[in-house]
Amino acid sequence: MHVYSDPASERHVNHMAGVEAPERFPAALAGVEEAENTGVKVERRPCKPAPRSALEAVHAPAYLEHLEELSASGGGYVDFDTALNSASWETATLASGAAIGAVESALSGTAAFAVARPPGHHAGRAYGMGFCLLNNAAIAARHARSSGVERVAILDWDVHHGNGTQDIFYADGEVLYLSVHQSPFYPGTGDAREVGEGRGQGFTANVPLPGRSGEDLYAEAFAGFFIPVLREFRPGLILISAGYDAHTADPLGGMRLKSASFGRFAAQLAALAREIGAAPPALLLEGGYNLNALTESVAATIRGVEEEAPAWEYSGDVRPIEAARSTLAPFWKSLR
Ligand SMILES: [Zn+2]
């Protein structure tokens, strides 16, 4: 496992969002150490800021200039809960660079985790919101595409729907975006009926779950939806938008996952990647606001990727994910 991180991740302070705090970074790194202490081999890699061309492959040049100038002038707001300080531009471009590094490691055969902040999945082509400035997952996906990977999937298990990632790829069919999230909940998007448009039809797949859902319902989403669709799509690379705010201890999310749940998700996806001959997964940190839960969950995720997949409790009860299955069935044989 390669871990991409930079101490700059602690320098971005979003005054409007106390929970998306600098302390999340050492807490996540403590999870990397915890995995190491239980025998996982981890190699730490430095990150470089994402090159402008990689940022412009996803974001509008004027939006990037706005962020850079706002940060250079000392900071400001791009949304009611999303603020920058003087370090934010550098920190955000390093987070995107970490995601690119993770893709390069994965494509050369080693699973990787970009442990960086701020998160990215609410940021769209020309907007930042929900603590997110640059969409690291989208930047990583486009980087993988330009490196010659024909089919790229992003699986987003953050408790919030990744509206920004969905928006960026909604009409182009270039990347398969899969999300499981709490609904109804911030940011209000992610209905099962949002399936993409034009050439993108069928390449957005949302599994909204009610609040208080636990690992049993997530198991249905993985075994009854994500895994069959991914097996049919046969991506060359699976990117994971790894948010940990669906943890039962999270102050924002209302779900009931345990730290070990994330290890099971990661193990399923790593096993699938091996089965279909894809690169090992590249993971990127999104949300997760209880520091202890973040540490434990990151550790569980890394162990899940590196160890054999444990048995998966799957009842075959598709009722909780029926809306997603029936809506996407016209596009995916494996759901019929
Ligand atoms: Zn979140």
Image (tube, rainbow, N blue to C red):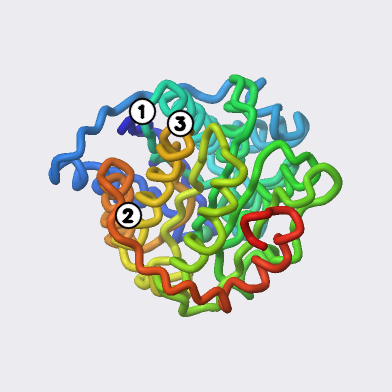
Name which of mark 1 and mark 3 comes first in the sequence: 1
CA gap, disc 1 and disc 2: 17 Å
- In this rendering, is residue 214 above or below 156? below
Closest to the observer, 69 or 199 = 199
Using the image, tell me which numbered label, if any, was put on residue 279: 3
Identified by mark 3, the residue type is Ala
Is residue 310 in sight in this rendering? yes
Viewer-side label of 3, 2: 3
Is residue 77 in sight in this rendering? no
What is the tally of numbered marks visible in this picture?
A: 3
Viewer-side label of 1, 3: 3
User: Residue at left 58%, top 57%?
Assistant: 179
Name which of mark 3 and mark 2 comes first in the sequence: 2
Q: Residues within 10 Å of mark 3 (few under 14, many from 20)?
A: many
Name which of mark 1 and mark 2 comes first in the sequence: 1
Image quadrant occupied by the N terminus: top left
Identified by mark 2, the residue type is Gly
The secondary element bearing badge 2 is classed as helix
The secondary element bearing badge 3 is classed as loop
Image quadrant occupied by the C terminus: bottom right
User: Residue at left 51%, top 28%?
Assistant: 100
- Residue assigned mark 1: 110
- In this rendering, is residue 294 above or below 182? above
Identified by mark 1, the residue type is Thr
- Residue assigned mark 2: 263
